[in-house]
Structure formats: structure tokens, C-alpha cells
Amino acid sequence: DLEEKSIALAGKLLEMVKKAKPGQGRKMAQAVLDSGVAWKKMQEIIKAQGGKANIDSEEVTIGAYKHYVNSSRSGKIVFTNNKGIGDLARILGAPMEKVAGLYLNKQLGDLVKKGERLFTLYAQNEERLQLAIAALKKIQIFTIK
């Protein structure tokens, strides 16, 4: 889903800046991804930010402290609060604490049942995790109808 959205957005941007003809941006973005050019650029960005440019996704670890957030009702996810996701990630310690963040178990458009896992919070320490859990009283990540 993230790949699809990223390709669509990149395609639109390529068309807007006239790097691709109208209707051809998505195809161009897909080609850049498939060719490995996008990965090489990502590695350059990681290196420029002081990270390990040749990292493998299998090497990425998650926080020792976690909390599952389950659905309080059944229905369909009709909205995802991206700002809220960012806010929670920062409360958990991201991006400075590399093991902190959220894992979305569900996404926009998914049908969920009451009690089903929506997302998981990860933190390096209990204090950050408790702050994020408290913030959930004011931050709603998904709207379910």
C-alpha cells in the first residue's frame, strides 16, 4: 500500500514539475523504483544523515517496550490521522531513538472487528511508552464507522 501511494505521489510530482508528460509520471516513477535508482538515492540520504547506508530491513530492531491498541468497535476504517501518527512517534522517541515508533496493523479501508489489533506502539523505555498511551486519550489514529 505504501509503495502504491508513493509511486502515485511521485508520478504526480514528476508531471507537475514537467519531468514527465501528463499521464506518464506514474510509469516513470515505477521505472525509477524498479531500476534501483530510488534505492541508491535513499542510501545517499541515509549516509548524509549519518546512518548506515547499506542497512538491510531485517537488521532494524524494535523497542523493548510495546503496547497493543485494539479496536473498541467493529466497522470500516474511514480515516487515518497521519499527523497523530507523527505526534505519537515523536512522543515514543522517534526519530532520535531508532527503536521507537508505531506499527500499523490495519490501514484505511480495512474492515475490523471489536477487539482486533489496530496498531502497536514501540518504545525504548517504559516512560516514553506510558506518555504515548496517555496521549492516546487525545489522539485518535483511526476513525472507524
Image: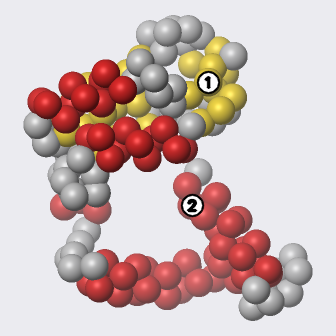
SS label for mark 1: strand
Q: Position of residue 75 (x, y in %)?
A: 65, 15
Report the amino acid beneath label 1.
Answer: Thr
Asked whether residue 141 appears in the rendered view, the answer is: yes
Q: Position of residue 16 (x, y in %)?
A: 79, 80
Work out whether 122 lies above or below 131.
below
Q: Is residue 44 left or right of residue 98?
A: right
Q: Residue at x 51, y 26 (%)?
A: 140
Residue 12 sits in which quadrant? bottom right
Q: Residue at x 28, y 52 (%)?
A: 94
Residue denoted by label 1? 143
The dot on residue 125 is: none
Work out whether 64 lies above or below 3.
above
* Sequence-earlier tag: 2 or 1: 2
Report the amino acid beneath label 2.
Answer: Glu
Nearer to me, 58 or 48: 48
Q: Residue at x 36, y 82 (%)?
A: 45
Q: Position of residue 128 (x, y in %)?
A: 19, 35
